[in-house]
Image: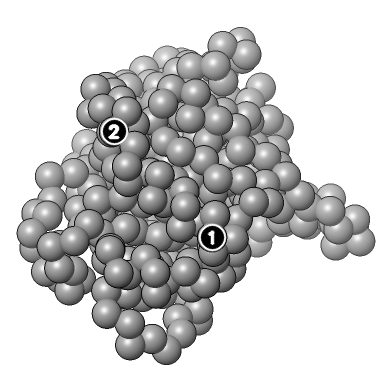
Amino acid sequence: MFCGGGSAGHVIPNIALCDQLKGQFEISYIGTDGIESNICKSKNIKYYEFEGAKLVRGKVLCNLGIPSKLRKSIRQCREILKTAAPDLLFCKGGYVSYPPAVAAKELGIPVLTHESDISMGLANKLIAHKCRRVLTAFPSTASKLKNGVYTGTPLRTDLFGRDRIMAKRAFGCDLRPTVLVFGGGSGSAAINRALRGCIAELCRNYNILHICGKGNTVYSSLYGYKQLEFAEDMGEVYACADYAVSRCGANAANELIALKIPTLFIPLENGASRGDQVENAEYFKNRGLCRVLKESQLSPASLKNELDALIADKKLKTALKENVFNRGNERIIQEIQSALKQPFD
């Protein structure tokens, strides 16, 4: 049984593993009525739902009811797990993972979790000691944990080997370089504003494929500018992209690096997050695999200048070409198989 949700970043890696494990194991998922529910149901994955309790950062009054909500969530998960009787619970972090992990530990069901970022998220920090192993996307994260194992991050197989010509044709791109701009599952207002402030200049030289988030499209007849609220098939989107501008959530960052797409990362900064995207961006920047623009310095002018610099950066392109990126799927599956063979606690 898999769990994890609250955002696509906690669900999509699980789905990558589910797709590979189908036929070998009976797969199910436990989560809330959030994005994980819609994704799992669209993939015909057996789904169990409970009421989650989400921490709202920086708003004390909103969190006063969390203890009682968590107790209720854990009770619900305990009953679900008794009924479903999974042999293993695999968590992917986020507030959705905490109640199932606590309930599984109480019932003697082995638990694994995976951390995508360099720094541990709150849910994974809280459940780490309840897990057989804490699997990580970055080596330095695993080295700080007694039960940490570096595996890399799971990536969907359908992102690779896509037809570039067909993808460009599907999005109406001409022979000029195509720049993909996106800001996570719900888009980014800051990136959207900066891009639209220089879009006319950019479209003189590039195709711009802009995933702007639900309800965020604007009227434009500008040649070379294509807007999408969201993309069902990111493999096709990536195949179309010669370059990218993106937030630096761990999954998007690893996908872009794995696909060797030269990228300008604009990480979500402290205050709006726990600072994980800044750390992710610095990790890849220090290895010469990306360029980074601070959100505090983001403007139409700085975005255009940094994008021009990205496209001219031959050293970065060489570093990406030579970089060996190992998907974590197989190593993670080995850890799942290993945990299933061990006696329960």
Locate the N terminus and report the quarter of the image it occupies.
Answer: top left
Q: Nearer the viewer, residue 220 or 143?
A: 220
Could you tell me which quadrant the C terminus lies in?
A: top right
Find disc 2 in the rendering and name its residue: 314
Q: Is residue 10 visible?
A: no
Mark 2 crowd level (few <14, some 14–19, many ≥20, 10 Å Cα): few
Q: Secondary structure at mark 1?
A: helix
Measuring from the top left, give residue 238's x and y in whole percent.
Answer: 26, 53
Mark 1 burial class by Cα count in 10 Å: few <14, some 14-19, many 20+: some
Q: Up-down: is 256 above or below 283?
A: below
Secondary element under disc 2, as helix, strand or loop, is helix
Q: Are marks 2 and 1 in contact (CB under 8 Å)?
A: no
Residue under label 1: 301
Does 8 appear above or below 92? below
- Residue 146 placement: quadrant: top right
Could you say which is closer to the camera, residue 271 or residue 293? 293
Give the residue drawn at x 49%, y 23%: 286
The reply, left or right, for residue 289 in relation to residue 104 is left
Q: Nearer the viewer, residue 305 or 102?
A: 305
User: What is the x, y in percent for residue 87?
Assistant: 42, 33
Residue 40 picture location, percent across and down: 38, 59
Callout 2, which amino acid?
Answer: Lys
First reached walking from the N terminus: tag 2 or tag 1:
1
Q: Position of residue 34 (x, y in %)?
A: 54, 64
The three-letter amino acid code for the residue at tag 1 is: Ala
Q: Looking at the image, which residue is at 68% across and 30% down?
A: 125
Give the left or right position of residue 189, taking residue 46 as reference.
Answer: right
Q: Is residue 201 visible?
A: yes
